[in-house]
Image: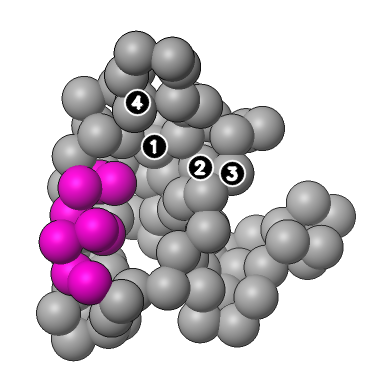
Amino acid sequence: MVTKFLSNASISKSKPNVVILYTFAPTTSIVNSSPFGFKLQTYIRMTGNVIPCDQEFTKPFGKNGKSPWIELNDEAVPDSSLIIEFLNEQFKV
């Protein structure tokens, strides 16, 4: 379930081939209040520097109301499991 969209926010922040991870901001005691966001952050860290990633905390919910979600080359992908499959295909991890 990958959707293409263009918005002012995505145009201004999007870099070619850089994943923008939208999730909840860390607190003083936890990295991410969502287990799904934590799972995705851990997955990206475990791949080393294979997946270039920037994090954004201003829009934690995507168009379908799910968090986390990513944007890569103006494609939005919701749901942590779908995101991992998508990143595996895109970056050959």
* Mark 3 secondary-structure assignment: strand
Return the x and y of residue 85 as percentages of the image width and height: 17, 63
What's the amino acid at mark 3? Glu
What's the amino acid at mark 4? Asn
**Magenta-colored stretch includes residue 51:** no
* Mark 4 secondary-structure assignment: loop
Q: Residue furthest front?
A: 28
- Closer to the chain start, of discs 4 and 1, is 4
Residue on which the image places disc 1: 68
Residue on which the image places disc 2: 22
Q: Distance between the residues labelled 2 and 1?
A: 6 Å
Mark 1 and mark 3 in contact? Answer it, CB < 8 Å: no
Q: Which mark is residue 11?
A: none
Q: What stretch is highlighted in magenta?
A: 40-48
Q: Which mark is residue 32?
A: 4
Mark 3 and mark 2 in contact? Answer it, CB < 8 Å: yes
